Image: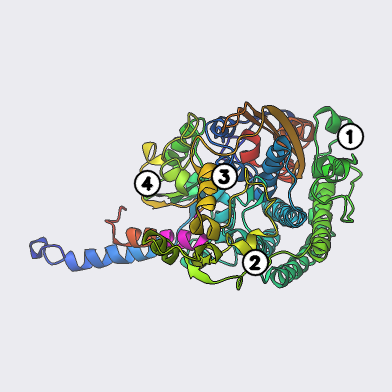
Amino acid sequence: MTQVANGGFGFFTSKLERVVGWARKYSIFQYPFVTACCGMEYMSTASGHYDMDRFGAGLPRFSPRQADVLFVVGTISHKLAPILRRVYEQMCEPKWVVAFGVCTCTGGFYDNYATVQGIDTIVPVDIYIPGCPPRPEAVLDGLIKLQAKIERQKQLY
Amino acid sequence: MGPSHPAMHGVIRLITELEGEKVVRVEAEIGYLHRAFEKSCENSSWTQAMPYTDRLNYVSPLINNFGYCGAVEKLLGIEITERCKYIRVVMSEISRITDHLTCIAASAMELGAMTAFLYFMKAREYLYEIVEQVTGARLTVSYGRIGGVKADLPDDFDESLQGALKQVERELSEVDKLLTRNRIWVDRTRDVGVLTKENAIAHAITGPVARASGINYDVRKAFPYFVYDRVRFEVPLGERGDNYDRYLVRMEEMRQSVRIIRQALREMPRGAVSVDARGRIVESFDLVDRAKLGHTAGLVDVVSTVEPTLEGTQKRYQEGISPRDRTVMLPSKEDTCGNIEGLMNHFKLIMDYHGIRPPVGEAYFPVEGANGELGFYVVSDGTDRPYRVRVRPPCFFNMAGLHTMLEGYMVADIIATFGSINMIAGELDR
């Protein structure tokens, strides 16, 4: 609650923040940057059995200009890393990044010359969903945590 | 058309030269998912290489597992049990069905047929549940073991699989009704992306892509392995080699796979022998405590039980699938936790720098992957780590021939054709 010294508008701005947060968390347009095996679990999560649509995240946008959440799904190799960075920079604010699968969190068991050991070395990550591949329930859990984060963060306009 | 593109299939860069909307030249740039499979296998023991093989063709992981196991078994010269062969065939065919379902679903979605995608994903979920029942994981299973499989099938496998197959057949016929005679689908895929027979042979293309062009080569028929020479099935062949033929070949292959599974289930030799009530049964920790106190009288007749979470590794599940070769297969958990011989056997197989040691030599074992001939070439130098594990990835050759299928057609056909060859980056780049 902002101070009364602001002239008493604090109540309205914080309510506005909450409304904007509520609206943003239930309208997630994700850009699924799918590379590897985790993509199969992403497809399963997006489909009828473990629906992502009921969380408001049902419409993937296949262009970074139109998306607000970047789901990095699957192993990122050093060859692909600059492209991931470029895609991230093409997205407009506000944007969030979800590291889906343990290869994106820490490199997974691909501890070798070719794999980026965690995409947080390249882009700032909001939610880490470990698993190889993570079960759809784990993905939905991560999605719910992302929504909680979106709702309570300071909104940018 | 960069590695991050709107199509659902893997990361690849297609450098295209266009003349208006027409594609003049295409060059494919690969390697965006290189994960050093072959190098990682050289640094891990023969059994530790199994999880890496899952992630090659990650839509049909069991086929890769069994291909690798088959190559090492060939090197070792051991023969797996009959029941094991049937189990491998059933699980391979389930994997093949999931691969074709994913391929057609993704290509349909790229051409705008979202419904087909959702129906096939639903069918795939039933199969994933079956795979999870048997192996414990949905996707990256590591089910194969050198000398057999990890554990025998669960007790109610038959009924659940028959139920899942019915659902899959229902979805197949639904999507068949939606797509096969659909004017839009036919217009977009008929005579698009034609692969001639000469080009297919020149680029060493195998699998459904080659069979759609009329080349009658299926590893299951040409070099039968496991029990493929004992089950009756047909290999569908196409005529024109266009996208539509590839779609039809995959649909028919799924039906043939269902047929193979049903036959294999009927003919599978009986498995799990119940050894429950043989002798007195004591919990394994109790056994150890008693032995430490010196109360060892009569312990040799006792059968130890293990925790329910180790289900699948118990004696009754090992009976049918173990090839009785102590140098290769892990003993059952009752033996490992119950007597010292079992423990020593387990130790010698699991610990680093012990493990299985195939004789010096090399072996090549081809299996019919969902995309074509998937071959594993293993070289052993007598130590507990492979000297070389080379994969013949079917997608590599398909991708090499992709430019012949794209040149001369429109830009919009790139996605359709690229989807129909089922490029799986994990297999392509290894």
| N-terminal label among 2 and 3 | 3
Toward the viewer: A59 or B367? B367
Query: Of all residues shown, which one is farthest toward the front?
Result: B297
Q: Main secondary structure of the magenta part?
A: helix
**Can you see residue A61?**
no
How far separated are the C-alphas under marks 4 and 3? 27 Å
- Looking at the image, is B15 positioned above or below residue B255? above
Residue neighbourhood size for the residue with mark 4, other residues' Cα within 10 Å, grouped as few (<14), some (14–19), many (≥20): some
Q: Say left or right for A147 vs B132.
A: left
Residue placed under numbered mark 2 in the picture: B154
Residue placed under numbered mark 1 in the picture: B197
Chain letter belonging to callout 3:
B
| N-terminal label among 1 and 3 | 3
Residue placed under numbered mark 4 in the picture: A125
State which region is magenta.
A134-144
Q: Amino acid at mark 2?
A: Pro
Of tags 1 and 2, which is closer to the observer? 2
